[in-house]
Amino acid sequence: MSAVTPDVIIDRKPGKKRRKGLAALRKIRNALARRKLEEMHEEELLKEQLYDVFADPEDSK
């Protein structure tokens, strides 16, 4: 078993901060992906509405 010295403890602390940073980056990335999906869905709805507006009334019968 290795001895715990102050330099070992100092080396471990930045790793913990880095993991917290990675978790935050993952949350941000997921939020951006979610927003992108919502925007794509809204665009699809707008396209469908435009097609409905400009569609011939004869075609819908």
Image (cartoon, rainbow, N blue to C red):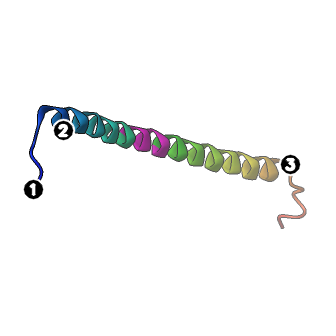
If the image is split into quadrants, where does the C terminus sit?
Answer: bottom right
Give the mark nearest the N terminus, 3 or 1.
1
* Closer to viewer: mark 3 or mark 1: 1
Q: Are marks 2 and 3 in contact (CB under 8 Å)?
A: no
Give the mark, 2 or 1, whose residue is nearer the N terminus.
Answer: 1
- Tag in front: 2 or 3: 2
Label 3: few (<14), some (14–19) or many (≥20) C-alpha neighbours in 10 Å: few
Q: Which residue is mark 1?
A: 1
Disc 2 marks a residue whose amino acid type is: Val
In terms of depth relative to the viewer, which is nearer, 33 or 3?
Answer: 3
- Left or right position of 27 against 59: left
Horizontally, residue 19 falls left or right of residue 31, namely: left
| Residue 60: quadrant of the picture | bottom right
Q: Secondary structure at mark 1?
A: loop
Q: Position of residue 45 (x, y in %)?
A: 67, 50
Q: Nearer the viewer, residue 11 or 29?
A: 11
Q: Position of residue 21 (x, y in %)?
A: 36, 36
Q: Which residue is mark 2?
A: 8
The residue located at (13%, 32%) in the rendering is 6
- Which label is found at residue 51? none
Depth check: give the residue in front, 59 or 32: 32
What amino acid is at disc 3? Phe
Q: Provide the residue span drawn in magenta.
A: 24-30
Residue at position x 42%, y 44% in the image: 26
Q: CA distance from mark 2 to mark 3?
A: 70 Å
Q: Secondary structure at mark 3?
A: helix
In the picture as drawn, the residue positioned furthest to the bottom comes out as 61
| Three-letter code, disc 1 | Met
Circle 3 residue:
54
